[in-house]
Amino acid sequence: MNSTVSNEARSRYDTVTLARAERAVRCTPFRLALFATMRRQSVDLRTIAGQAGIQAGYVDRALSELATENLLLWLIQVGLLRREVDGQGLTDSFRLTPLGHQLVERWQCQGNGLPTPTWLDRLYNSLSRWLRLPSWLQPF
């Protein structure tokens, strides 16, 4: 993605949307390697969950399929991911949205992996996720 496209994409998202999405990613156990792979191709749920996820470098610790899917669904709700669809409906594979591409590109250029969440990030993310606050009530 060239810088012109990146600047155009950046202008499509307000600061609240970007902050919420960044915070959501920082608060997951997923590593940048997962999102870098999702920039190129869809990734199946079973390659993220369990020992397969650790071996692929996608997660910090083994997660059950249910926990993995719940985290991925949260990232869908904040606009980072989308679920793949085939001729028969939804699949168990996930890809980045344009917002996700933008954030992952930025983190890859910085070369430091995903930023570490603060305790305040974790609090805000938990409140947003579990209470499903409307956007106008969500903290920056």
Image (tube, grey):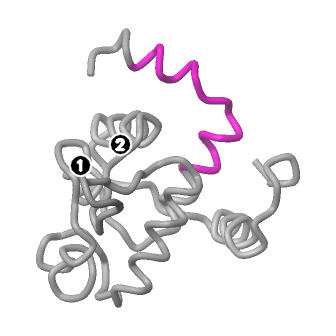
Image location of residue 123, percent across then percent down? 71, 71
**Image coords of residue 139 (percent x, y):** 80, 53
Count residues near mark 2 (Cα–Cα under 10 Å), then give few for <14, some for 14-19, many for 20+: many
Where does the image place residue 138, in percent across and percent down from the top left?
A: 80, 54
Q: Is disc 1 placed on a helix, strand or loop? A: helix
> Toward the viewer: 136 or 33?
136
Amino acid type, mark 1: Ala
Label the magenta part by its dominant secondary structure: helix
Residue sitting nearer the eye, 36 or 113: 36
Compute the Cα span from label 2 to label 1: 7 Å
Residue plotted at (22% across, 78% down): 46
Inspect the magenta stretch and tell me whether residue 121 lies in it: no
Image coordinates for residue 28, horizontal then vertical, percent: 46, 69
- Callout 2 touching callout 1 (CB < 8 Å): yes
The residue that disc 2 covers is 104
Task: Tell whether 68 sits left or right of 22.
Answer: left
Identified at 13% across, 71% down, the residue is 56
Per the image, the residue denoted by label 1 is: 36
Rate crowding at label 1 as few (under 14), some (14 to 19) or many (20 or more) other CA atoms within 10 Å.
some
Question: Is 129 situated left or right of 54 in this image?
Answer: right
Magenta part of the chain: 6-21
Looking at the image, residue 85 sits to the left or right of residue 41; the answer is: right
Reply above or below: 138 against 123. Answer: above
